[in-house]
Image (cartoon, rainbow, N blue to C red):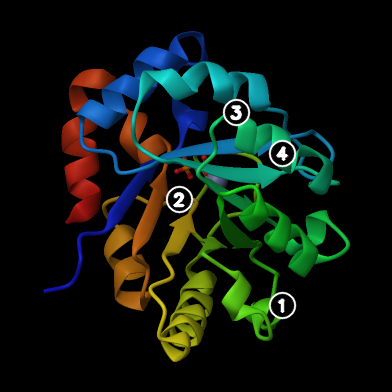
Amino acid sequence: MAAKTIIAPSILAADFARLGEEARAVEAAGADWLHVDVMDGHFVPNITLGPDVVKALRPHVKIPFDVHLMIAPVDPFLEAFRAAGADIISVHPESGSHLNRTLKRIRELGAKAGVVFNPSTDPSVIQWMMDDVDLILGLSIKPAFGGKSFMTSQLKKIETLRAMIDATGRDIPLEVDGGVTPETAPRCIAAGATALVAGTAVFRGGPDKYAANIAALRG
Ligand code: DX5
Ligand code: ZN
């Protein structure tokens, strides 16, 4: 039997006035990780939150913080996010000059190092550095906003990334982020995803619905 799919609710879709409560509610509802989208209004056209918010949230839940950095330059902020409690730190190759150096630094800080693929980013970016990667995230939307439609064009890329992971023999989580719903989740899993990020599909309907929403993504 295949391992249970990891569900990582994105707090981007939570009520920002009650973030601690929202984090506790999704953890109680069965979330495996908490996905935290960090945007700077420069690398992507939206601004969300910084390390102080991550730090304030950390005591509210025990589940790992899966921090998706959409900021450039990214290197100067790695340490602050790790100190704030990030367990996984994922970066876009386009957000710094030397991806290998950035990934190495994330590991030195004691976090897992993830690489994020924009819809246009080619899998070959990590072809020669698979040993340095602890998580791969395929975006199925343009980064910046939640609630966008899933880009089916990305499923082939997920399959390619799955094959690259399998060739390593390592158990590297393959995460899909953007437009993940009970309808698109099975397609992501069939393509080889082992972790799913979902904002809108988890937080819709309010806290009473979170458990059912998460269960629906697991299929
Ligand atoms: C967007 C973020 C996503 C976003 C997904 O740039 O990376 O994590 O929160 O939101 P939904 O699940 O609503 O598409
Ligand atoms: Zn994200």
Is 16 in front, or is 20? 20
Could you tell me the amino acid type at mark 2? Gly
Question: Rounded to the nearest whole Å, what is the CA distance between mark 4 and mark 1?
Answer: 24 Å
Q: Name the residue under label 3.
A: 84
Q: Mark 4 points at which residue?
A: 79
Q: From the image, which quarter does the N terminus lie in?
A: bottom left
Rendering quarter of residue 125: bottom right
Question: Rounded to the nearest whole Å, what is the CA distance between mark 2 and mark 1?
Answer: 24 Å
Q: Mark 2 points at which residue?
A: 179
Question: Rounded to the nearest whole Å, what is the CA distance between mark 2 and mark 4?
Answer: 30 Å
Classify mark 3: residues with Cα within 10 Å, few (<14), some (14-19) or many (20+). some
Is 187 in front, or is 114? 114
**Upstream in the sequence, badge 1 or badge 3?**
3
Q: Give the residue at x 88% y 62%.
A: 97
Classify mark 4: residues with Cα within 10 Å, few (<14), some (14-19) or many (20+). some
Q: Mark 1 points at which residue?
A: 125
Could you tell me the amino acid type at mark 3? Ala
Question: Rounded to the nearest whole Å, what is the CA distance between mark 4 and mark 3?
Answer: 8 Å
Labels 4 and 1 touching (C-beta < 8 A): no
